[in-house]
Image (cartoon, rainbow, N blue to C red):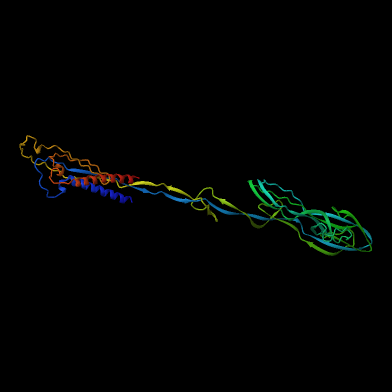
Amino acid sequence: MTTQTRFLTGSLASLAIASAVTLAAPSAYAADAPARPCGQPAVPAVYVTVTSDPEVRIIPAITHDEWRWERQVPVLAHEYVKVLHAAYTETDWSRDVAGTTEYRWTRTVIDRAAVPAVPGTPEVGHWETVVVTPAVTRTLVEYQQQQTGALRWEPEGWNGEKGDDDKGQGWVRTGRTTEEVVTPAVTDQHWVVDQAATDGTPAVTELSHVEYTWAAASPGTGWTATGDSHTVGGGTETTTTTDDAQPSGAGWTVVATRSFPAVVDTQWALEAPDGYTDTGNVQVDHLTTEETDGTAATPPAGDGWSQVPDSLVVVVDQPATTELVGSGSTEEVLVSPALDATPPCPQAAPADGGSSSADAPQIQVAAAVSGAHSGTAHHAAHASTSASAASATVLPETGNPVSPWLLTTGLGALLTGGVLVRAGRRRHAR
């Protein structure tokens, strides 16, 4: 669009120059114009200096796009195990004995010792909680099978709550109770974390079971008499020991042997609790988001990276610049050639004593034409010519008639060309 505008303004400027030349140069009307009349002074040649400015070209900036990058990283939990109670065997013994008094003995075997919790750094925050429906709980009682030693939790009254008339054959209460949540509370909570917590070691509760046996004397360390006794006589006496231990006394024979597996506690954690061994099994505990601090055109090393939404930035590698194309030019254009002076006219005495046509006033003619880009008239023609009442319709020094309309048209074209050249140069400079 700029090139077209410059071409238009240059063309109009050329039209204006041509019009001015047509008005100023006598030879523009006819190549075979009649000879100049006598008494005409010499007319110097008229030149116009046409200057062309160098073209300004804009070199655009060089840029590239960059983003911040993010990815989801899995945090793995490991499986840890700890043997709470080693595997053991139970052996039933029998013997034929005379009537003797035996006492019932009991002991508590700790399968897993209690370990206090090692607190970590607690999470700092506050809850916004609304209880919709409160929790429904019930009390469970621990029962033990007197023959096998097995334990189970049941509601109170599950065994009929009989006395000890079952001779040690059924289930009895151990005295331990616990609360079971039948229907958990329904709440609406929102936890606002002010400071994240650090991991600690959770507490390990004690696990144990109660063992019973009948013997005439204490079976060993840790056994306590319950106060129950019975007389065994004239028949077969039975007892049970663990891990192939021999009953006290003589005459015992093995009736049956049972094996029990070890009691193992399994925990999944990010770090190994004290006393636990890693099994080598892993599972995803949670996902965390990893994000780059700055921006880059390509993702960091590794898999799973994606661009963070709305993080695009445009980095300017080289700002936009301008440069001049060409060096411009200056040219002298001939508007009208020089004219020689004509011979003086013969003197004639005026009839009324006035001045003759040879004594006409001097008229100064100056030609100034704007160039296609920044033309400036440096030369002007100065000439003296005769002027009379009819000189307004005759071109100086030629005697050729010229109409006022043609004169007005030429001057208007000259002014219009200068305005358009100035406007084109201002638009090009922007």
Residue 414 locus on image (x, y percent):
24, 45
To which quarter of the image does residue 98 belong? bottom right
Going 44% across and 48% down the picture, which residue do you hit?
316
Total tally of numbered discs in the picture? 0
Residue 386 locus on image (x, y percent):
12, 39
Whether residue 81 sits left or right of residue 351 in the image: it is right
Whether residue 41 sits left or right of residue 50 in the image: it is left
In the displayed structure, 36 sits above or below 211; it is above
The answer to whether residue 123 is seen in the rendering is no
**Which quarter of the image is occupied by the C terminus?**
top left
Residue nearest the observer in this picture, 162 or 151: 162
In the displayed structure, 388 sits above or below 256; it is above
Residue 377 locus on image (x, y percent):
23, 42
Residue sitting at the far bottom: 255
Residue nearest the observer in this picture, 315 or 310: 310
Whether residue 313 sits left or right of residue 190 in the image: it is left
In the displayed structure, 112 sits above or below 92; it is above
Residue 398 locus on image (x, y percent):
13, 45
The answer to whether residue 189 is seen in the rendering is yes
